[in-house]
Amino acid sequence: MARLIDRDRAHVWHPATHFADLDRLPPIAVERARGCWLHEAGGRAILDAIASWWTCVHGHGHPAIVAAVREQVERLDHVMFAGFTHEPAVALAEALLAAAPPGYERVFYADCGSAAVEVALKLSFQARQQRGEPERRRFATLRNGYHGETLGALALCGASAYRDTFAPLLFSPLELPAPSFREHEHADLASDLGRDAPETQAAIAALEEHAHELTAVVVEPLVQCAGRMTMTGAGFYREVARAAQRLGIHVIADEIAVGFGRTGHMFASTWSKVQPDLLCLSKGLAGILPLAAVLVREGFDVDFRGAPTRSFLHSHTFTANPIACAAAIAGLELFRSTDLLARLPARVEAMAARRRAVAAACHAVVAHRQAGMIAALEVVPAAGSPGARDGRLGLLLREAALAQDVLLRPLHDTIYWFPPLVIDDDELDRLAAATIAAIRAVAE
């Protein structure tokens, strides 16, 4: 039988990957995963320092989640969610609302982060149409933001690399400035950082000027993850959200990447004491299976009651899939049974110590920052180094880290750590050592 990699090359189209890059850095065939580690068939173990695109907050293959999935698939694998319901979907909605700040009433399920954003956009827009505010049809978004790659979500992205090709297909949002704190520390989340930034005042002024046409502002709270892990400040988010709601503009929080303990609270909005009107969740929600949810504030559904024509006609084939819901329930229970949130401050500080050590050891690191269990290091390669000559700094750094059996996926000049929340000290040491080796090999 042909090698798996050869079969892959013949028939599979990988996301966010240039075909030529597969010659330079072939895909790695993973046979199994456990905890923070990915395992190849030949026995090689790779430390998953980015939680497989920010998903598995409890690590891979957690026995409690595996057991919940196994039990659920034997009982009910799937049923359409229009006209039917089931225990996992209802129990998960109850658990999410109990974990969220007070004021949320309903959960609308989808199957990925982009879809959750689309649901929120459409809910906001349709509510305006049905409450007699048809002029409020435009969205505001943050410069440098990222919300997914379906067309509605893509229209909100501030990065030209994602949206320029598809620009003729996209609506035009109002783009708001946002500050960037390149030396952000985790303790800054408990401060008003960003409140008095000039970008904050400019963003609020733009909201005030355009309030008559805006239905919602869409924000990634605290960290613009795909935007090179830009940290915007808890004070910025607080002031912009409060201004929007004062002006009658819905706040849509995209917590797809930063929810479920990633910043130290279950939901990132808690740091800023913000209650978004619509709160989008995915990634860490089920962790190992495709699932997304939008938490909807109390009273929002009033505009959808009345005649059948006022229904929200949005659906996904796999809405509230019972197996995915069971995995999510088990994951939420792990936060309680392992007291994970209470243990996170020690993990955050342990990661911060390693981040600072990497920055001190590498001259090419020009800035570094952290929010919860998200750390970022900006790298400027020295003249004459491979990273300066090649033009593909992120790819070179990823390749060098893999040579140390660590999975990093830098965003061009920004190495980030986004591991499972349960990463231990030995694994953090391994991560730091591999990061230093990669930076020195590529950029110094």
Image (cartoon, grey):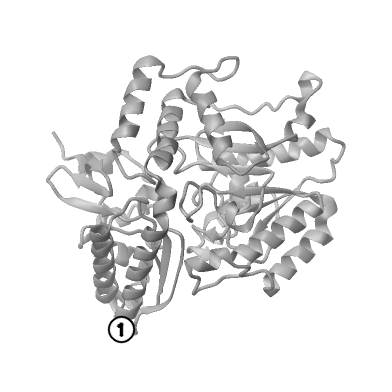
Q: Nearer the viewer, residue 308 or 73?
A: 73
Q: Residue furthest right?
A: 132
As rendered, which of 370 and 78 lies closer to the eye? Answer: 370
Q: Callout 1, which amino acid? A: Gly
At numbered mark 1, what does the secondary structure look like: helix, strand or loop? loop
> Residue 140: x, y in percent?
71, 54
* Residue 234 located left or right of residue 317: right
Residue beneath disc 1 = 384
With 290 as the anchor, is 222 left or right in this view?
right
Q: Say whether residue 185 is visible.
A: yes
| Residue under the image location 12 percent in, 45 percent down | 42
User: Is residue 392 something one can see in this rendering?
Assistant: no
Q: How many marks?
A: 1
Query: Considering depth in this image, is 24 or 377 the residue closer to the camera?
Result: 377
Residue 415: x and y, percent?
Answer: 38, 66
> Residue 364 location, x and y as percent?
35, 79
Residue 82 against residue 60 in the figure, above or below: above
